[in-house]
Amino acid sequence: MSCCGRSTTAGAARVSTRGAPSRLAASVVPLAAYFRCTGQSTVTVVGPVSGKMYRFPSSGQIVAVDARDTTSLSRVPYLQNVRPR
């Protein structure tokens, strides 16, 4: 039943994506970052933002970490931020 003879979709907003610049691409945040252990022994770190525990078992091992922990893990000795392969 409609009021005053108007259609129920008459007030619906219409969105056109044609020709509109994409702002979504600029705001996408990566979900994971990758770190390599450069030390000679096991390194274990807890990410301060995610609360996850990351274990780097030996030199050369690459571990995926929550991207929100990247800044803090970059300051840890014997951990190096690397690009995924």
Image (cartoon, grey):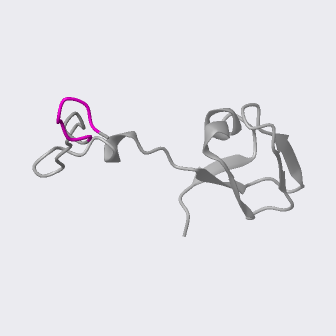
85 drawn magenta: no
Per the picture, the main secondary structure of the magenta-coloured stretch is: loop
**Which residue ends up furthest to the left in the rendered image?**
19
Residue 75 vertical position relative to residue 58 in the rendered view, above or below: above
Locate residue 58, reporting x and y percent. 84, 62
Closer-to-camera residue (15/44) = 15
Locate residue 31, reporting x and y percent. 58, 50
* Residue at 32%, 41% in the rendered image: 1
Tell me if 21 is positioned left or right of 36 in this view: left
Locate residue 8, reporting x and y percent. 26, 40
Closer-to-camera residue (21/37) = 21
* Residue at 85%, 57% in the rendered image: 40
Residue 13 vertical position relative to residue 84 in the rendered view, above or below: above
Tell me if 3 is positioned left or right of 43 in this view: left
The residue stretch that appears in magenta: 2-8
* Residue at 70%, 39% in the rendered image: 73
Tally the numbered discs. Answer: 0
7 drawn magenta: yes
Q: Quadrant of the C terminus?
A: bottom right
* Residue at 28%, 40% in the rendered image: 23
